[in-house]
Image (tube, rainbow, N blue to C red):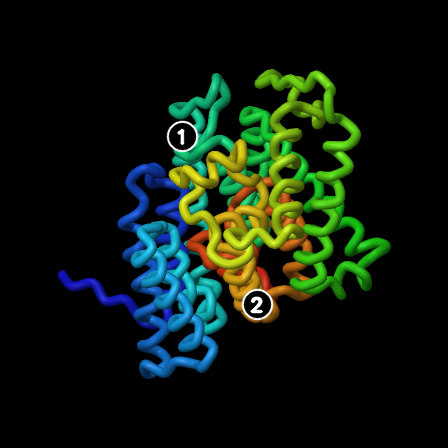
Amino acid sequence: MSVFIKVKDLSVYFFIMMCIIIYAIPDFIQLPFRLILLLSLTGYYFYVNYARITFLQLFTIIFMVGMLLYKLAMHSFDFSLLMIFLSIIPIMSVKYYTFTNQHIGLLRKWLYFFIITIIFQLMVYRYEGRPNLSYEINQSGSYLFLFFLLCDVLKFNFGKFVILIASFLLLSRLLILSIILFYVISFLQRKWMGTFINRLSYTRLIVLSNILIILFSFWFLVTFSGSALGGTDSIERLTNVVDGSNYVRFKINTEIVLRLLTKDETLLFIGYGDLASSKDYLNDFDLMPHNELMKAIAQLGLLTTVFFFLISKKVFSSFIDKTTIVYFIPIVLYTLILWVRFTIVPSFEMVFILFIFLLKQQSSTFTLSK
């Protein structure tokens, strides 16, 4: 028996595969599946566009190839650079996909399977006694939040309820805060500040929010420097913002900014490469930056980070509107306090987010029941 998949149905199958990789396959064996899917998305783009490529895409590919060759020559190759490279065409091609009512019905059925896999992982994996997915505890929270947004798009309230419960089991302050912010922005958009919120753009949100978190980082260090800051993995951590964990996070933000102001050539031009294995980085800093922008600068350098910002700006400009802004704002919050690559550096997760936005933009044509 042969199986035939129509080209127009590939959008939903690509997206389901992304969900399976993120929510059903353990983190430590995901890499080959991510590579295959990114290559498939790239191949599909060239298929539907008759192998045509835009000047921006060509320039970006040449830039990335040059960077990869330079890193190899300098013996500082970072495997994540390959993932960035393979994500470029997919993030630029999401706008070419479409979803139908039949696709939505199929996705809603798959959500039950993903709920089961999420609950199973929460039962199996532990981090210092706290349940989590197969990822690092903070990364687990970020993926759960993206699943929460997907459930909202598909009006799957049971899934949102499961994620809400999971957020308290993880004791994840950022996950809980992001969910609260989502509802606050939704309320304000409907009631009082709709015009203001709807006029927010990618550039305004990314630039202003990162300026604010940098200023807050300096204030936090000045205010609580010298204080005895501890940490806890009990329920108390949900209401305790002033702890050692946050102090170190904000301290690294200020150190990177100060080094940039003193024209540190490593941070300006080439970055440290893989931060987890870079002896130079580990000698200069205490911990990986818990901020997407700061991590990108530390790893890739300011010059490359600005380049990726401009690429992402062009991509997101097609997806941020009054229907998706309520999703984008809490996603930006996540990038301010965690190192996830959601909004600036091309990544597998960015492709996933863009698909969620595409589903939301096309949702007016769907027939959904809660």
The image quarter containing residue 82 is: bottom left
The image quadrant that residue 368 belongs to is bottom right
Mark 1 neighbour density, 10 Å: few (under 14) some (14–19) many (20 or more)? some
Q: What type is the residue that disc 1 sits on?
A: Gln
Q: Secondary structure at mark 1?
A: helix
The residue drawn where x is 28% and y is 57% is 36
Q: Which residue is mark 1?
A: 121
Q: Residue at x 76, y 65 (%)?
A: 199
Q: Which residue carries the number 2 mark?
A: 310
Can residue 303 be seen here? The reply is yes
Whole-percent x and y of residue 341? 51, 50
In the depicted structure, whether residue 197 falls above or below residue 44 = above
- Please indicate whether residue 239 sits to the left or right of residue 39 in the image: right
41 left or right of 368 in image: left
**What residue type is disc 2 on?**
Leu
Return the x and y of residue 276 as percentages of the image width and height.
42, 38
Q: Residue at x 58, y 48 (%)?
A: 294
Please, which residue is most extreme toward the left here? 1
Quarter of the rendering containing residue 215: top right
Q: Is residue 97 visible?
A: no
The residue that appears at 43% across and 62% down in the rendered structure is 102
